[in-house]
Structure formats: structure tokens, C-alpha cells
Amino acid sequence: MNRIPIHVRLLGDYMAELQDQGLAPSRISNYVKAIRLLYRVNGIELRLPHPPSRRSIREDRGPKPEELQRLLDMADLREKVIISMLALGGFREGTLVRLQYRHVREDLERGLVPLHIHVEPEITKGKYHDYDTFIGAEAVEYLKLYLQARRKGNLDARLQPEDIHDESPLICDIRSRTPRPIGEKRIYKTIHELYFKGGAPEAGSKWRLHALRPFAPKVLPYSTRSSRRQLRLHRIHDGAHR
């Protein structure tokens, strides 16, 4: 069995992960060069479809609406939650994996849309300040169905019905029999696997994970009248367009 294509794909995933970490193109190129050299001295040539550049030749871009929809069409229920939360809530993956049911419980159980989420500084990048954001009807629907499947034990044959409480992770690691939060690397891997699943590895080379965030509404500073007023306006607007 020829495993070279698998190693090429893994090396491409590694390149994309380094890009998501914000490393300079020249540094990424050096890392990849060292790995390819290791293979070469063992008689294996890894030819990447998109070799790393030593300089930035284009800006990151977010997926177009039709490209985002294609990802959602391919995704399973949990993956739909991940994509829609990243794209519509504007979360960094490090914040998304730390969200718990308590962050959505009040608005979710009241059936409010957009659903308001307050993010504490402890789970933000840099831990500098808190902020408010919200997710729209599509993301709320995916989240409701996902939580229902967990409660009924329908998400995976290996998992038992789950008693979801305030401290339950909002998105679970599907590989764990006991509920634990999904990891940042698993979020990254999930998105990039969907890129390749769609038969468009070039998309993975152009999009970084945070490129999904331009779809999100602007996050709002907490404890200001304007942020609360803006949230009410979004709910009124959403209700008027249903």
C-alpha cells in the first residue's frame, strides 16, 4: 500500500496548523524543509501540492457564503455546531473549547434568538477582558439538536445518555466515554478534514481557522448600555425576518 499520499496530507495539515499559530512564512518553510529532508535521506520524496512560501503572497480570506454552506452540508451534527459557533459567534478555538452549558443555558431554555453569550476574561486569549457575543438561528438550531442527541445518547453508539448541567462542556470530545471538552487541536483537525473531504485541499492552504470569524457580528464590550441595546436590536431584527 502506497502511504506517501497520507504523509503528504499530514505534512500539509502540519503546515496549516503552523499558519494558524501565526508563524512567519520563512519559519514554516524551514520546518517543512527539515521534515522533507528527513524523508529524502530515507529514499522518500514528499512533493507537496502547495509548497510553503518564504514570504506572504496573499492575505488570509474567510470562506465565501457558498463555501461555508458546503462545509456545513458535509459536516455531521457536532461539526455543524463547531463551524457555526466559530463563524457566527466569532470565537477563537481556545475560547470555544472552554465554553460550558451555563454560557448558553438561560437564552437557550427561554428560546431567545439571537442567543447571547457572555465570555469571561479567563477563557479569552490574553485574559484581558470579557465580552459579549451572540449566535443566530442556524447555530442555535444546530446546538439544540446536538445537546438533545447527547441527552438521549444518540450522538455515538459508544456514548451513554448524558446528564447535562451548568458545568458540562458545550462541545464534547467524541472519543471520550466520559464528557470532557473537545481540544483545540481537535477543532483544527475537524475543520481541515472537512476542507479535504470537500475535495479542495487548496482551500485549506488559503484559509486559516480564524478566517471563519468575519462572518460573526462584532463582539460587544460588556456592561455598557450600548451593548445591551445592540443585542435587543439584533433580536428585533432577527424576529422581523423570520
Image: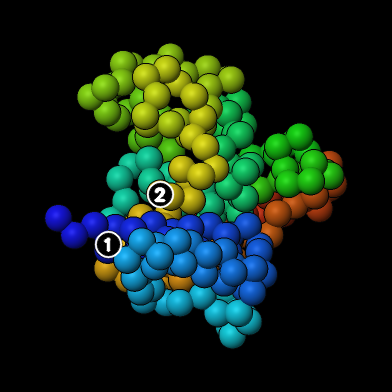
Look at discs 1 and 2 and give the one toward the viewer: 1
> What percent of the width, then of the height, locates residue 191?
42, 54
CA neighbours of label 2 inside 10 A, class few (<14), some (14 to 19), many (20+): some
Q: Nearer the viewer, residue 38 or 168?
A: 38
Find residue 124 and report its horizontal and vertical position in percent. Answer: 72, 43
Q: Secondary structure at mark 2?
A: helix
- Badge 2 amino acid: Thr
Residue position for label 1: 4
Q: Is residue 172 visible?
A: yes
**Looking at the image, residue 37 lies above or below residue 170:** below
Q: Looking at this view, is 238 or 227 the one in front?
A: 227
Instruction: Tell which circle, 1 or 2, labels the residue nearer the N-terminal end.
Output: 1
Label ID, residue 94: none
Q: List the single residue furthest toward the bottom.
A: 57
Q: Residue at x 18, y 60 (%)?
A: 2
The answer to whether 180 is drawn above or below residue 26 in the figure is above
Which kind of residue does numbered mark 1 sit on? Ile
Taking the image as shown, residue 32 lies to the left or right of residue 5, namely right
Q: Position of residue 176 (x, y in %)?
A: 40, 24
Task: Examine the image and state in which quarter residue 242 appears.
Answer: bottom left
Residue toward you, 61 or 68 = 61
Q: Which residue is mark 2?
A: 190
